[in-house]
Amino acid sequence: MTSWCRLSGGRFSRPRSGGRGADVADRGWASAQLIEAAQAGDRESIAAVVHGAHSHVRRFAEHLCASPQDAEDAAQEALIILYRKIGSLRATGALASWMFRIVQNECLRRVRLLFDRYDEADAGLATSAEEEVIRRLEADLVAQAIRELPDVQRRVLIMRDVLGHPGPVVAERLGLSNAAMKSQLHRARSRLRHSLDGRNDTADRPHQA
C-alpha cells in the first residue's frame, strides 16, 4: 500500500510551526483559508491539510471498516485521494463530510472485494450475464447490510464468518472474552439476517403505478 507521505517525494512532514500548518495544529480540520490555498495548488498548504485530516480519517476508518488492516488501508487511500483531488472540493466547509464519504466508500469497496474473492474461488462454474448481474447486486446488498452493523458486531462478523478466523483469535484481537465475542457474533448474524430479509421484501414488493 502506498503511503500518503511518499506522494511528495518523501518530504511530507509535520507542518512547520508558525507556517500555514499552524491553521491545523490545534483544531484538527484545516481552516477555510488553508483549504483555499490548498485548492489553489500550494504544496505546503496541501501537506498541512492532509496532516490535519489524518487523525480524523483514521477515526472514521476504524469505525466504518471491518478490520484494523482494512481501516489502515482505507485511511491511506482516503488521504491519497485528498492529496491528489483537494482541488475538486467545492466548499471549504465540506472537507469533513467529503472525507467521511471517501472513507465510507473505501470500506464498503473492501467488503465487496472479500465477496468477489470468494465468488472467484467457487468451482469456476460458467455464469450468464444475467446471473453475474444478480450476483453482484446480492453482494452489494450484503456489503451494505454489513456496513450498517454496529462497529464491534461488524468486525466480529467479518473476522469470524468472512475471513474465517478462529473464535479465540477474533476475541483476542478485539479485546473481548470468548463469551462476549460469541454474543456479538450472534447479534450480528441476527441483525444481518433481519436486514437482508427486509431488503428482499422491499425489492419483491410490486411498484404502484
Image: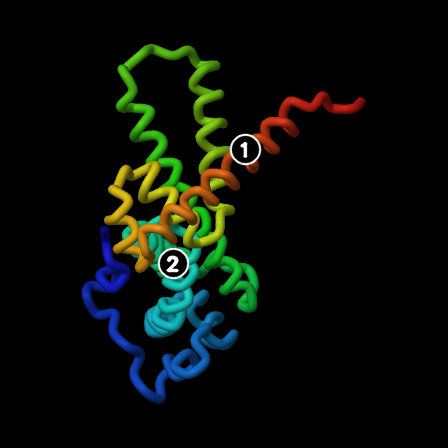
Residue name at image x 54 percent, y 33 percent: 196
Residue name at image x 41 percent, y 44 percent: 185
State left or right for residue 140 relative to residue 120: right
Residue 196 is marked as 1
Kindly indicate whether the residue at mark 2 contacts the one at mark 1 (C-beta within 8 angstroms): no
Disc 2 secondary structure class: helix
State left or right for residue 69 relative to residue 189: left
Nearer to us: label 1 or label 2: 1
The furthest residue to the bottom = 18
- Percent x, y of residue 38: 42, 69
Mark 1, Cα crowd under 10 Å, few <14 / some 14-19 / many 20+, is some
Residue holding disc 2: 62
From this view, report whether residue 42 is shown above or below residue 207: below
The furthest residue to the front = 179
User: Looking at this view, is 123 or 21 the one in front?
Assistant: 123
The amino acid on which the numbered mark 1 sits, given as a three-letter code, is Leu
User: Looking at this view, is 111 or 133 the one in front?
Assistant: 111
Residue name at image x 51 percent, y 46 percent: 148
From this view, report whether residue 86 is shown above or below residue 166: below
Kindly report the distance in space between the C-alpha atoms of the residues bearing marks 1 and 2.
24 Å
User: Looking at this view, is 172 or 25 the one in front?
Assistant: 172
The furthest residue to the left = 10
- Percent x, y of residue 160: 32, 41
Mark 2, Cα crowd under 10 Å, few <14 / some 14-19 / many 20+, is many
**Residue 103 in view here:** no
The amino acid on which the numbered mark 2 sits, given as a three-letter code, is Glu
- Percent x, y of residue 159: 32, 44
